Every structure is written in structure tokens, then in C-alpha cells.
Image (tube, grey):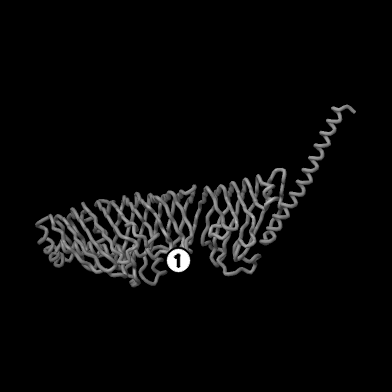
Amino acid sequence: MTRSVKFAVGVLVGLIVIILSLLFLNNFAEKKIKKSLEDGLRKIHATYDKVDVKVLNRSAELINPSIKFKGKILEVDTIRLENIQLWEYIMNKDIVVGNLNISKPVIKFYNFEKEAGDTIEEDKSPSSDFNSRVRIKNIIVTGGSFEIFDKDSINHRLYTKIEKINLDEVRINSKTLKEQIPFDYDLILLNADSIYYDLNAWQNVYAGNFIIKNNDLLIKRFKLKPKFSKTEHQAHIQVEKDWYDLEIDSVGVKKLTWSIQNDSLQIRNDLTEITGAKFYIYRDKTQPDDNTLKPLYSRMLREASLKLGIDTLKLADVYLKYEERINTDRPPGTVDFSNLNASITNLTNIGLDREDFPKTIIHAEGKILEVATITADWEFLINDTSDNFTISGYMGGLRAEAINQFLRPALNIEASGNITNLYYNFKGNNYNANGEIKLDYKNFKVEVLRKNGKGKNKVVSAIANLIIRNKAVNEKRNYKEISVERDTSKSFWNFLWKCVKTGALKSFI
């Protein structure tokens, strides 16, 4: 046998030994990894159709896994792991994976205290026997849904359809398992749609799209919809309670971060933008009064369990319509605001005890009744337990006829003429307010209607106009000082209206 033949035979034998060794190691490793996966699934009492491990491809696949415990169900079509780092697992029991692909997970939470078919008990200390470290370079979730049910398992409390979730550099260890979010990650992309949430007894929440890209959030077609019509709403309340209907084209949040601090959700972001909102409010004053305390916004934010740190909140192209029914035999009075734009800075209730706590500043402008320009500048300190505030503003170019859609059904009055300018400047707190108002008007007249609203009460109207005419000689008014006591069972907006009304009556009379 020549040397070349011997060399060739030696190489062939070597290759055969290597192949046999790889086949043995592959079979050994596949069985070892498969057994480890199956043992882990058995420990949490998961069911599945098949576990498939291919060491040469450095991949593993789990077919139709399902887990159920304490009213929680997870069902998945397939879970596939790719680019598994075998050496890390064999030597250190660490799990290092290139890609984890999860197809069509269906996650269901049932709001039961305990369900008869529970298969495992929740571990009070999930990190107690977890000594491995997990690092996954990329997790991709496609399709599926997340659902929460009330005690009636047919009705959803929350439903969202998952389009895609992408997480980069996911890390799990004994330390992260002790946190509210049991893993760390570097980048995230989440795209969900068809969101439904049963908010309370009166409203549902919907959203067309919910997109998170790294630290930016975009919500499209957000809706807060009433469960009942305006008439039906009154049958479901014991005291006066507003009916709401809100739709928003988009909500954009920049540089969003969030965490859990002392069991409270804490949200921070640089900029929140709300665009294209339509908000309808209906109030039936024939219902019994709700005499509970109505805190001012500074106190509401100060005592809120949700902790906010929003540098700037902007609202653009907002429409608001308010309807108020005072008499059962008349239609409601209406007033609307259009083309509203507002900017709010330092909307925060985090770090209330710090010396440099910032003042919340609000500027808004728009149209009232589609014809009159309005502006408002409002400031308060959320950490001020006295709830001090200042608010000033302007309204100009309001034809009296425009407000008849509110005056006629609500107060049984019709007006004519013009309110050319109205300036106000108030300082207040939880209990009282004072300040000044200046009202300029021209040819302003009122007609008091009869009780049936169909004819004029000439005597009362003449007396009212006689009083107004006495002041109408001079169209330019001086500032009138006002002092008003607050009814703490009413809202801030009732308080502001009371201040404006008091100043207006002083100007007219």
C-alpha cells in the first residue's frame, strides 16, 4: 500500500470517526436538551404536542404548548429557538439564544379567586431555585391576543390583538425575577390593534392601534364611549353624573419611561401630543345633586396613585360640546368650543417635597360658539396643599344671539347685541377667589320668556333692560372687583363660571 493510499485511508477513517462522534454527541445533546425542556415543562404542568431539538442546527421547537394556572391560560402555536449556544448551556447551565420566535400566543386572564382546574401553585419566590442566566438576542412575537375576562367568562374586560412584538437583548436572571418586570431589554417594538377595555359601569375604551417603538408611543383612534344613551344613562345613576363621549385621532408620547415605585405606576416623558379630539359632555341637572367633595385639580394630581412626570402636554384641534338640561319640559342648553389648542408644562406629581418643585403652567386658546375668540392662562403648584391658583383670560367678539342656544332652554332668556370684550384675572384657592373683570358691550338687551318659553314677558323684560340701559351709555367699562366663595361640592369649572358671572352682573348692573 502506497503512502498516498495510506494517507487517504487515514483521512477517511478520521472523517468517519468525527462524523460518528458528532452523531453521538448530537444524539446525546439532543436528548439532554430535550429532557431538560420536557422536565421544565413538566414542572409547570404544561401540555404540548411535541418537543423537537436539532443540535446540528442549534435549534429547538415546541409545538402547541399550553399552560394553565390560577385562572391564567397561555396557548401558543409554536415556540422556536434558534442559534442556541450549546457550550454555555453544557458548561454553565446558562441559556444563550440568538432568536426566540413565538407564533400566535393567546394569553387569557380570568378574574377568579381560584379555579378548580388549576395545575400549579404560584411560587412566592420565583427566583429561589433559578440559578441560570438567560440571554436572548432577539424575541419576535407574531399574531395572537391578550385577553382579560370578568367573572362571567364570556365577557371581556380587556382584549387586544397582537400584530408584532420585537425585543432585543433580553436578559433574565435571579435578580430580574424579583422585579415587577422580570427581565431587562435594550430595544422594543410593539404593535397591537383592536384594543377594547371595559373601563367602568358607564364607559368602554377602544383604540385602533397601539404602537411602542423604543421609548416612543403612538395611539391611533382612541375612543372613550358611553355604554348607554343620554336618556338610558340617567336610569343607571343615583345622583347627577356627567355623560361622556370622547374620540381622539392620535396620542403621541416621546421618550416614555415607566417603572413601579412603592406599588404605584410611575410614568415620565418629555412630550405628549393629543391631536384631533372631539369631546361631548351631557349633564342632567334634574337629577339629585352629588354633594361629595370635588377637589381642585392640584389636589387630585397630588393625591393620585398614578405618578406622572410630563414635561410638556400639547393639545391641538380640539372640539368640546357641553349640554345641560335644567328643565324636563325643555331641550338642553348647549355651548361649544372649537379649534382649541393648549399647552401644559410641568404636569408632575413626582418629588412633591423638593424645594425646586415646578409650577404647572397652562395656556389655551380657541373659539366659543364658533364666533368669539377666547384665551386662558392658568397656573398652580401641585404640591401646594392650599391649592392656590391664578387664572386670567379674554373673550372678544361674541354676539349675544349666539348664546341663546344656551340661555333660551336653560334660563328662559333671549339676548341681543354684542359683548365686544371681556377680560378677567382671578386668584383663588380651595375655598374662595377674588380678582377683577372688565366687560365691554354694545346695544345689549335681554328678553325674559314666559314659562312655556313661547312668548316674551314684556314687564320683566322691560325692567331688566332698563337696568342694563342705564349702564349701556358708556360702552367702555372699568374693571369690577369680585370676591366669590366656592361650593366645594362643585367642580373647578363651576367655580370659574361663578367668578365670571359675578363680575358680569356687576358690569351690567
Q: Kindly tell me whether residue 60 is visible in this rendering.
A: yes
Give me the residue at 64% from left, 59% from top.
130
Q: Kindly tell me whether residue 297 is visible in this rendering.
A: no
The image quarter containing residue 454 is: bottom left
Give me the residue at 64% from left, 61% from top.
129
The image quarter containing residue 466 is: bottom left
The quarter of the image holding the N terminus is: top right
Q: Give the image location of residue 429, x and y in percent.
A: 28, 65
Q: Give the image location of residue 234, x and y in percent.
A: 38, 68
Residue ID for mark 1: 201
Position of residue 237 in the picture relative to residue 396 (left or right)? right
Residue 131 or 307: which is nearer the viewer? 131
Q: Is residue 501 above or below residue 442?
A: below
> What type is the residue that disc 1 sits on?
Ala
Total marks drawn?
1
**Dot 1 surroundings within 10 Å: few (below 14), some, or many (20 or more)?**
few
Position of residue 86 in the picture relative to residue 396 (left or right)? right
Q: Give the image location of residue 481, x and y in percent.
A: 17, 63
Instruction: Residue at the far right: name it.
Output: 1
Position of residue 322 in the picture relative to residue 253 (left or right)? left
Residue 371 or 17: which is nearer the viewer? 17
The quarter of the image holding the C terminus is: bottom left
Give the structural element (helix, strand or loop) at label 1: loop
Q: Is residue 152 above or below residue 137?
A: below
Q: Give the image location of residue 330, x and y in percent.
A: 29, 65
